Structures are given as C-alpha cells and as structure tokens.
Image: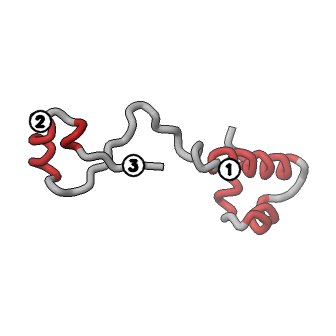
C-alpha cells in the first residue's frame, strides 16, 4: 500500500523550497530507483505471449496453416506469419 508523506517532515528545507518552485501544493510521485521491471513482467503479459507464441509455432510446425491459426487466435494473418517465422 502506498502512503503519502509530508515533504516538510522528510526533506531538507533547501530541497523542499526547490521542489515548491515546480509543484507547490500538488501531489508528486517519486518512483523507486533502479526497480523498473521489463515490459510485461509484473502483469504476467510477457510470459503469456511467450507461451502463446510458442504454442502457435508448435501448431504451425505440426501442419496447421497460417490462415487457420489466424482464425483460432483472432490475430491477423501477418501477425501469425511474423510469429511463426521469427527465430
């Protein structure tokens, strides 16, 4: 759970005055340093698409044609083609 802190209680006066030049009276979000995760890792999207694309390639390699895969996965023909030909 995110908490709000009074900047006056935790920042040096000189830094607080400098920040007030930019965002006086407004809420300011300060992200954590060095904790940015790659796209899709936090939500699980990266692993979902990796698994789905692997499944598509397996089906293609076992004889399912691109048009059928396109219909099954509700993706364009070109998208399926990019997935199956990607190394």
82 to the left or right of 7: right
- State the mark number for residue 49: 1
Q: What's the distance in space between the residues labelled 1 and 2, CA to CA?
A: 48 Å
Among the two numbered marks 1 and 3 on one chain, the one whose residue lies closer to the N terminus: 3
Residue at image x 27%, y 50%?
28
43 to the left or right of 10: right
Q: Secondary structure beneath disc 3?
A: loop
Q: Which residue is mark 3?
A: 3
Q: Marks 3 and 1: in contact by CB < 8 Å?
A: no
Q: Is residue 44 above or below residue 15?
A: below
Q: For the residue carrying disc 1, how many other residues have a C-alpha within 10 Å: few (<14), some (14-19), or many (20+)?
A: few
Q: How many marks?
A: 3
Among the two numbered marks 3 and 2 on one chain, the one whose residue lies closer to the N terminus: 3
Q: Secondary structure beneath disc 2?
A: helix
Q: Nearer the viewer, residue 10 or 44?
A: 10
Residue at image x 69%, y 63%?
77
Q: Residue 48 placed where, x, y %?
A: 70, 50
Q: Quadrant of the C terminus?
A: top right
67 to the left or right of 64: left
Q: What's the distance in space between the residues labelled 1 and 3, CA to CA?
A: 33 Å
Q: Residue 68 placed where, x, y %?
A: 81, 65
Residue at image x 34%, y 50%?
4
- State the mark number for residue 9: none
Q: What's the distance in space between the residues labelled 3 and 2, CA to CA?
A: 21 Å
Q: For the residue carrying disc 3, how many other residues have a C-alpha within 10 Å: few (<14), some (14-19), or many (20+)?
A: few
Residue at image x 70%, y 56%?
80
- State the mark number for residue 13: 2
Q: Secondary structure beneath disc 1?
A: helix
Outermost residue to the right: 62
């Amino acid at each position: 759970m995110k908490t709000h802190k009074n900047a006056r209680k935790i920042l040096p006066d000189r830094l607080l005055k400098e920040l007030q030049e930019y965002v006086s009276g407004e809420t300011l979000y300060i992200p954590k340093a060095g904790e940015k995760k790659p796209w899709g890792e936090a939500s699980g999207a990266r692993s979902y698409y990796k698994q789905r694309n692997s499944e598509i390639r397996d089906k293609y390699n076992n004889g399912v044609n691109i048009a059928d895969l396109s219909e099954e996965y509700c993706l364009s023909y070109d998208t399926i083609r990019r997935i199956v030909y990607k190394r």
